Image (cartoon, helix red, strand yellow):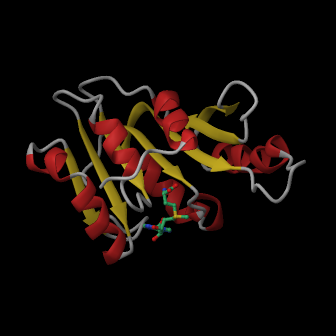
Amino acid sequence: MTSQASTRLRWAVDTLSPAPDDRLLEVGCGHGVAVTLVSQRLDTGTVIGIDRSEKMIAAATRRNRSHVDNDTAFLLRTEFPDTGLEPEFDTIFAAHVNVFWKRPVTALAEVRRLLRPGGRLYLFWQAPSWEPGFDKRGFAEPIAATLREHGLIDDEIIIGPPGDSDDSFCITAAAK
Ligand SMILES: C[S@@+](CC[C@H](N)C(=O)[O-])C[C@H]1O[C@@H](n2cnc3c(N)ncnc32)[C@H](O)[C@@H]1O
């Protein structure tokens, strides 16, 4: 049986709010839960989920069998930023993947190469449950600055989901 999507990933996909014809890339898709939620919103659009782990890509492919079979979802084992993918993505997103600020020179060059002009990068994170006072903005602001330094524009920090469980956050910025 396929596990239920967590609140944080449902909020993430609500935040992405993909149009039915969008082309999306998820970096570090893990079990492919967000790929499922995105695929359910697509019509002619596509979502590519990549992960460096063979095991995760196998699990994500099993979970998304119907979306893979109808050419909505594509799951590939590859390590970002060495993707070799063709541009023009409307959206690139990742949840709990730190390559964008650990290796900003190469990772953000690949983001700029892959996004269409005006396309957006979204980086999602959840505050650790064992740190009740976790400073989400304090964590996110240096990442937003890194995105700016490496040529992305219009950055924004979004805290969510709305209500008592606002333990997640997203740093988003656009390609010129
Ligand atoms: C902490 S898990 C998060 C999985 C999923 N995004 C989620 O939020 O449930 C991070 C995943 O990203 C993958 N990953 C980390 N760095 C990566 C990179 N540079 N390229 C591709 N996959 C990566 C790992 O193999 C792992 O499956």
For this rendering, which residue is in front, 175 or 1? 1
Q: Is residue 43 left or right of residue 50?
A: left
For this rendering, which residue is in front, 148 or 49? 49
Residue 71: image location, x then y, percent: 12, 44
Residue 166: image location, x then y, percent: 72, 34
Q: Quadrant of the N terminus?
A: bottom left
Q: Is residue 72 left or right of residue 56?
A: left
Residue 89 seen in this snapshot: no
Image quadrant in which you'd find residue 89: top left
Image quadrant in which you'd find residue 128: bottom right
**Residue 131 against residue 90 in the figure, above or below:** below
Q: Is residue 51 left or right of residue 135?
A: left
- In this view, the residue farthest toward the right is 133
**Number of numbered tags placed on the structure image:** 0
Residue 116: image location, x then y, percent: 36, 36
- The residue depicted at 60 percent of the width and 61 percent of the height is 104
For this rendering, which residue is in front, 94 or 162? 162
Q: Is residue 98 left or right of residue 90?
A: right
- In this view, the residue farthest toward the front is 1
**Residue 56 against residue 144 in the figure, above or below:** below
- The residue depicted at 79 percent of the width and 50 percent of the height is 139
- The residue depicted at 64 percent of the width and 60 percent of the height is 101
